[in-house]
Image (cartoon, rainbow, N blue to C red):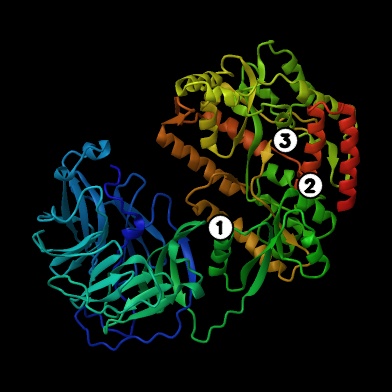
Amino acid sequence: MKKLFALSMSFAMFIAAVSCSSKVSSSSGNTSISEPVITQTMYKEERVSLPDGVNMPNAIHVTPNGSINILYQDNYGKLRAADFTKELSFSGSCPVSVPENTELNLIDFNPDGTATAFLMYCEDPQKIIDGTADDSDISFIIAEYDTDLNLVEQKNVTGIDNYISYGSTFFNSFSKAGEDYILCSSNNVLKIDSSGKVTAHTDADFNTYYIAARNGEVIYFNNHSGYGYADKETLDPPSSPTPFEMSAPIQRPPYPGDDVYLCYIILKDGYYGLTQSCKLQKIIDFPSSIIDAGNVYGIAPFDKGQYLLASSDSGGSFLSILTIRPDDYVDQRKTVIVGMHNIVNQQDYELANEFARFNDDYKVEYREYAWDSDDLKTDILTGDAPDMFIGRADDVYRYTNLGAFIGLDELHEKYGGLSRDDLLPNIAESFTYKDDIFGIPTDFMLSRVFIADKNLIGRDKASWNFDQFLEIYNSMPEDMYLSTQYSYILDPSSLFWTMQFQDEYIDFDNNSCDFDNEGFIRKLEFCKDARLIPPLGDSFYENSTPEEQSAVMEENSFMLKNKKAMISNLYLANLNDFVREIAQYHYSIDDVAILPVPSDKGANSLGVNNGFYSIVRNGKCTEGAWQYLNYIMDDDRLTAQLFRMELPVTKVSYEYWMNKWRDHLAQTKENTTNGNGYEITYSTVISDESFEYINELLTTATTSLSGMNDELQKIITEETDRYFNDECSAEDCADMLQNRVSIFLSERS
């Protein structure tokens, strides 16, 4: 059943835990205890990934012996419980029963390990799915669970109809208050007694949260006005709330406390406890602990000087143990300078923060370099080089030739860690230059490959040269185009760049080129004269109805199958791409051949969208840069990620994601794609034969380190466009390219 209320996971987080501090009594009624004194709020983190299928928790409970129970919803929205040992080892998971025809809204562990849930009920759940349900169809249930999470009691909530509206009410928080319950929604706060009857209410807004404290008080939190004691009977907010130190700080709802604090709350800058005198005290400072509040799902007291963190980042979802730093701790980590082209994005900063959270020796700072500037060369020559550089293949060629980068084999021999044996063999082969790997990407894909009916072009063309390609092209019927409308190879220039001719005519190792030869001229002439399908043009869209446009688009999608086109080109990043993109042509993978761009140098279909990571030889923190690269390429981190579009270059992570995508598609079984006004339904189940075929394509795809950059691309585009526009002959175009590219390469050497 789909979610019935727009309640995000971040607002469904309620955690109650038993404090393991040795300084306090375990008596739940003791309120005379002296308030805790905290000096250090900086923590070190050690984490473990959540197992496959275990999602971020709705609730966490730490038992008196330190083991961990979590409640979460699986990929199908079903409530499950998972157990972890004190060392965060996964002990298993099991389903948790909920009343029939209910949807979970909120669930909370009580301090004693029992749990309480607030659920929506609909006698006919199909009405929810169909969008036909209204307030008369919806009711609410409170469910009580024992410490083994057995459902022991359920009660209907009565008197709630006047305060909520199906589809527009959001629930912020829910907690047990002695024998009563407090439910906070986007427009009011309700007290519900032990029989399920609403007995009190007060108006509130979506910035408001209420929580029942262990001492029997009801605590009010509001993003704008502050916090304080609410009236226990009427739930009216405090007349003079204590303001927060920073505006709009609440990141997660408050949750019940223990003998140390009345309740806990996660704010924008850290984790706080509410003291017995109703003052917020910071326990964990997020900035100094390098914790991103937006990634935190919950924190709970764990052991003396330790807290349990549930969080996620680009490496996936985690449980972590946070251990307080000594009061005299001084951050003495060395700084790794990472240079990269253009603007550093948020994902890069988050990755650097992740690395720093788990490393006591190094932290990372980024330095930006403009595209096609010589700033990096200047920094290297003047002794201000970064320790790592994230650039393009062109940079790998250039700076390796200048002696500026260190190879992976040399780094592995000196420091251990990542080696070429960890990489897929075709990856290691493709990016080996001068007998070492001086730049390595994290991900790869099949780039600019052709798809064809396998009865027209056989699968034996996994590697073919231009003559073989031309032989098939010349045997095409006169009414067959080279490529489909969908391929966007609609003019000579786009065909030229799709065929990637530049890799065959530029020798970046020796800074030379060879454009003025018969082979290049022949390919240039082919691009100009190829039988390309005309573009539909603006007039088509201006002078036709949407129905007519849809009919033409659908007809175009059959061009391969109806033998009206020889090929179409695709970019294929993961298994989902294979089944979805091929389905657009009304084929399954079993029906097609996937072909690299024909090349006299051999197969050339491996593509890289992201940058190449290189270690700079005269950086000041080489070992730290190597540790950072090892962190980025770590299989434990890569396989823990929630989602990946492209495939990792390491053997272990590649195999993991191939199987994960295949399993996901097998569970989906069938999907529908929209093709500009018409739909194609296709199977997402990949046969063993097709899986092996795709796997072979991916693990044998190769490339040369393309040295293309913006200036070089501009030169080639200018001269070839002159030829395509009939402003010069093919021979003149080749001569001009030979001259201009030779000068360019000479100036960059």
> What SS does tag 2 mark?
helix
Q: What residue did someone put label 3 on?
A: 604
Q: Which mark is residue 76?
A: none
Residue 509 screen position, x and y as percent: 86, 47
User: Residue 105: horizontal and vertical position, in percent?
Assistant: 25, 53
Along the viewing direction, whichever of 217 and 466 lies nearer the viewer: 217
Q: Amino acid at mark 2?
A: Glu
Q: Position of residue 696 (x, y in %)?
A: 63, 34
State the separation of the CA atoms marked 1 and 3: 30 Å
Quick one: 254 or 626, which is closer to the camera? Answer: 254
Q: Quadrant of residue 724?
A: top right
Density class for disc 2 (Cα within 10 Å; few <14, some 14-19, many ≥20) is few
Q: Which residue is mark 2?
A: 711
Residue depth check, mark 3 versus mark 2: number of the one nearer the observer: 2
Q: Which residue: 28% across, 42% down?
A: 1
Q: Which residue is mark 1?
A: 347
- Foreground residue among 627 and 673: 673
- The first of marks 3 and 2 along the sequence is 3
Q: Residue at x 55, y 66 (%)?
A: 353
Residue type at tag 1: Gln
The answer to whether 605 appears left or right of 168 in the picture is right
Q: Earlier in the sequence, mark 2 or mark 1?
A: 1
Image-quadrant location for residue 59? bottom left
Left or right: residue 490 versus residue 227 is right
Q: Using the numbered discs, state the Cα–Cα distance from disc 2 to disc 1 in whole angstroms.
A: 28 Å
Asked whether, in this view, residue 220 is left or right of residue 385, the answer is: left
Dot 1: few (<14), some (14–19), or many (≥20) neighbours within 10 Å? few
Q: Report the residue at 74% width, 21% height from top.
A: 530
Crowding at label 3, few (<14), some or many (≥20) Cα neighbours within 10 Å?
many
